[in-house]
């Protein structure tokens, strides 16, 4: 074997000298081709070259034990001074946890546990900035006393196995979400992040100035999906949304990821049925990984999403339940976290609250024909006190109703919404929509305390945007 030295650090790549020479190096693939998870397929005594990081280190006389990890798992590597020589042994003694290494050795089994008996070890990337607690260590990522440290160094604590497990589950959930959309004949629409129109009041959106024009970071891609649904009939979008309404709750972020969809020729009952189908599909397909992840976190996975169809109550029925529970709420007020938690205790599984008052809902949603005080909207409230997961709505297709609702929200004279009017004046049909926050879903499924741990780089209120 031939070792190349780069910037005075031992080894970046190991080549088989019989196949490669220096003059032939350029353009040759040196990509890692064996991972920790692959080792169980290799026979005892097989020689391997493994690239990874030191997660933990134990020193016992003339033997050093390393827990070597990569993105797929951890394996113990055994370094004996007699085997590697004093120079290599002393090199390993000086390697701190988190060092990136390459090890050449053979697979063996000790006490029914697979190990790598190391013949050579090379330092690929050293550690010149110590971080405590160790990013890959057994850290309680939900400990509020560590919150500032874990968020300030999020770029390093992404390496933590617990946070990695959450984010891998997030990737799985989003993958199955896209798969469900594909199987149900939805077309992905990439909507803009910059928009001239917020869904709610201007003060609730984050504004930026582009070429002297004030625009906003999107709160919701609904206006753009509404345009696209009249072409494709079933459309969806998965992307970021932004809010400027300050909240210190455990289910709000300044920036979060939104699963949005719209369906033409559909009403509120139709979209509720589609959401329940999607929820069940996601949980059924990701259940094994969900339960493994929950075990890693020391928590119990929530599988309540499989218990559809969910209970449906009206907003007014919710007020009556709350009144009996000594949570009096006046008609027209939004149901907050405390109210949703109390309702969850009574109902015991995910449930829908429909008929939300028009005064608290945006203008694109249909006025209920049987009660003009309310809209054809339903919110899905999670079990176990985790609050609102998503919202569904029957959207306005009649231009006269749209004008009425725009007057309700003081938007009727705002020229920025002219393109919304256009859609409603050219062959607009009944359509329905839903929107769900990815982080809220992950938080609920894993029973974790805060949405900040369900996104790689959380953006939070009253906290500097860093890293």
Image: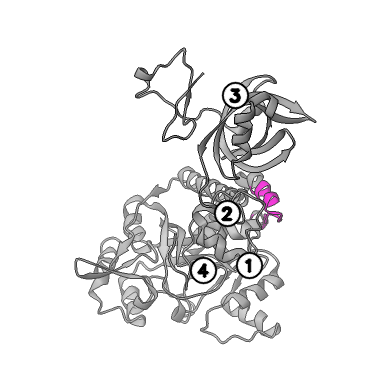
Q: Label 3's element?
A: strand
Q: Answer above or below: position of 175 versus 153.
A: above
Q: Which mark is residue 48?
A: 3
Mark 4 vs mark 1: which is more N-terminal?
A: 1
Mark 1 vs mark 2: which is more N-terminal?
A: 1
Residue 368 in the image, given as x and y percentages of width and height: 46, 75
Q: CA distance from mark 4 to mark 1?
A: 20 Å
Mark 4 vs mark 3: which is more N-terminal?
A: 3
Q: CA distance from mark 3 to mark 2?
A: 43 Å
Q: CA distance from mark 1 to mark 3?
A: 41 Å
The residue drawn where x is 50% and y is 30% is 32
Q: Answer above or below: position of 348 versus 60.
A: below
* Highlighted magenta segment, given as a residue range: 290-305
Q: Which residue is mark 2?
A: 279
Q: CA distance from mark 4 to mark 3?
A: 46 Å
User: Mark 2 against mark 4, which lies toward the viewer?
Assistant: 4
In this view, the residue in front, 208 or 377, is 208
> Residue 258 magenta-drawn?
no
Pointer 1: residues within 10 angstroms few (<14), some, or many (20+)? few
Mark 3 vs mark 2: which is more N-terminal?
A: 3
User: Mark 4 against mark 3, which lies toward the viewer?
Assistant: 3
Q: Which residue is mark 1?
A: 145
Q: Which residue is mark 4?
A: 252
């Amino acid at each position: 074997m031939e070792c190349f030295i780069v910037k005075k650090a031992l080894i970046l790549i190991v080549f088989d000298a019989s196949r490669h020479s220096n003059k032939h190096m350029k353009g040759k693939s040196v990509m890692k081709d064996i991972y920790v998870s692959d080792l169980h397929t290799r026979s005892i005594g097989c020689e391997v070259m493994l690239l990874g990081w030191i997660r933990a280190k134990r020193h016992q006389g003339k033997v050093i034990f390393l827990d070597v990890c990569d993105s797929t798992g951890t394996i113990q590597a055994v370094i004996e001074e007699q085997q590697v020589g004093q120079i290599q042994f002393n090199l390993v003694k000086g390697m701190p946890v988190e060092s990136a290494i390459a090890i050449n050795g053979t697979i063996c089994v000790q006490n029914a546990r697979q190990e790598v008996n190391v013949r050579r070890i090379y330092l690929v990337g050293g550690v010149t900035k110590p971080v405590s607690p160790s990013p890959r260590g057994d850290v309680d990522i939900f400990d509020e006393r560590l919150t500032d440290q874990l968020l300030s160094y999020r770029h390093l604590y992404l390496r933590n196995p617990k946070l990695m497990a959450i984010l891998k589950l997030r990737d799985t959930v989003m993958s199955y979400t896209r798969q469900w959309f594909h199987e149900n004949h939805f077309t992905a629409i990439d909507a803009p992040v910059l928009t001239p129109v917020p869904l709610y009041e201007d003060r609730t959106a984050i504004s930026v100035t582009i070429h002297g024009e004030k625009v906003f970071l999107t709160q919701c891609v609904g206006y753009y999906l509404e345009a696209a649904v009249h072409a494709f009939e079933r459309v969806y979008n998965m992307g970021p949304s932004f809010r400027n309404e300050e909240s210190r709750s455990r289910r709000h972020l300044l920036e979060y990821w939104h699963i949005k969809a719209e369906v033409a020729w559909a009403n509120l009952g139709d979209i509720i049925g589609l959401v329940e189908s999607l929820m069940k599909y996601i949980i059924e397909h990701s259940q094994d990984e969900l339960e493994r992840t929950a075990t890693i976190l020391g928590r119990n996975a929530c599988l309540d999403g499989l218990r559809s169809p969910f209970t449906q109550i009206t907003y007014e029925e919710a007020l009556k339940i709350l009144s009996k529970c000594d949570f009096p709420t006046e008609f027209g007020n939004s149901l907050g976290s405390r109210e949703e938690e109390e309702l969850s205790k009574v109902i015991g599984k995910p449930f829908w609250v429909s008929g939300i008052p028009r005064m608290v809902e945006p203008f694109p949603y249909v006025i209920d024909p049987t009660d003009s005080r309310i809209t054809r909207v339903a919110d899905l409230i999670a079990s176990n006190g985790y609050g609102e997961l998503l919202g569904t709505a029957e959207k306005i297709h009649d231009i006269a109703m749209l004008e009425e609702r725009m007057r309700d929200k003081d938007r009727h004279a705002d020229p920025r919404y002219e393109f919304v009017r256009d859609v409603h004046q050219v062959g607009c049909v009944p359509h329905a929509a839903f929107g769900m926050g990815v982080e809220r879903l992950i938080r609920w499924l894993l029973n974790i305390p805060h949405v900040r741990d369900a996104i790689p780089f959380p953006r939070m209120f009253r906290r500097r945007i860093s890293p």
